Every structure is written in structure tokens, then in C-alpha cells.
Image (cartoon, rainbow, N blue to C red):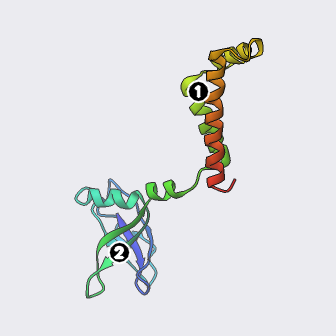
Amino acid sequence: MKIIYDKNTKKVLYHTGTNLMFPEGPPNEALDLKENMATFSLHDTEDAEKVQQVLNAKEYELVFDENDKPVDVRIIQTLEEYLSSIPPTKEEINKQVISKIRERYDINAEFKMQRLGLQNPNDPKYQEYLQYVQECIAWGDAEKAKYGY
């Protein structure tokens, strides 16, 4: 894997990913490098753990020595951290409410409970079902309020 960076700002521009033919990254001649660009290489097999961290990173930067030569990669944020920081949408919360209900009642059981409630709204099984559904809906409403929906 080659990590291409701007020599002036030291900002990472992109990486070449992994490559079975060139585990150390493609030759520099194969890259369209501009004058102000340089590369830092990670070997796909020898540096496999670091390569995987870069591939799973949302943001990373190069670490430079006192001579301004890159010597390592520092992960700033992984994709997992980034994705977990994104709040769920209103629709996703609604789906979670349905999933919570489905943990206890499949669709056929829900129809059965609805019929039971129409016949006898005071039936203990129906009341238990109704209580659980209301708890799930209240949880969903609280989640939506937490994210400003």
C-alpha cells in the first residue's frame, strides 16, 4: 500500500489500497505523482495490521520524524467510531420500535392480540401486550426526542 501525501502540508491525499502483485504498493512510476507529492509505503503482508487499520480508518495522518520523513501512520478516527457517532434517522428508530415488538410478538401474534382486544379490552393477555407495545413506542418517542425529531 502506498499512501500519497502533499509534501508541503503533509496531508494525506489518498492511498492505493492493497495489491497482490505489488504488496509494497505500485511503483512510483505507475502513480501520477505531481511535484509536491510523495509516498509512504506499507507492505501488505509485513505491515498487515497497520494496512488493515488504514483501510478501516475514516481519518488518519502520517507521523514524521525530525527530518520530515514519514515513519508511521496514526489513526485519528475509525469508520466504526465515525458510523457510531451518526445519530439514527427517525425511520431507523421506528424500525427499532417494530423490532422490539417483534422480539416478543410476531405479526400473527399481534393480529391475535388485536382480535382479543376487540372482543375483550380487559383481557389480561391483551393488557400485557398493550402495555409492552406502549413501552416500546414510548422508548421510540424518547429516542426521537433525544435527537430532535
Crowd tier of the residue under label 1, counting other residues whose Cα lies within 10 Å: few below 14, some 14–19, many 20 or above: some
Secondary structure of the residue carrying tag 2 is strand
Of residues 104 and 51, the one drawn nearer to the viewer in this rendering: 104
Q: Count numbered badges in the picture.
A: 2
**Does any portion of residue 44 appear in the rendered image?**
no
Q: Amino acid at mark 2?
A: Leu
Image side of residue 23 versus residue 87, left or right? left
Q: Which mark is residue 89?
A: none
| Residue 55 image point, x, y percent | 40, 58
Q: Amino acid at mark 1?
A: Arg
Of residues 17 and 106, the one drawn nearer to the viewer in this rendering: 106
| Residue 44 image point, x, y percent | 29, 58
Mark 2 or 1, closer to the camera: 1
Q: Quadrant of the N terminus?
A: bottom left
Q: Which mark is residue 62?
A: 2
- The quadrant in which residue 8 appears is bottom left
| Residue 66 image point, x, y percent | 25, 87
- Residue 134 higher or lower than 59, as above or below: above
- Residue 133 higher or lower than 84, as above or below: above
| Spatial separation of the CA atoms under disc 2 and disc 1 | 47 Å
Q: Which mark is residue 102?
A: 1
- The quadrant in which residue 71 appears is bottom left
Of residues 40 and 32, the one drawn nearer to the viewer in this rendering: 40
Crowd tier of the residue under label 2, counting other residues whose Cα lies within 10 Å: few below 14, some 14–19, many 20 or above: some
Q: Residue at x 29, y 65 (%)?
A: 42
Of residues 30 and 67, the one drawn nearer to the viewer in this rendering: 67
Q: Residue at x 62, y 16 (%)?
A: 125
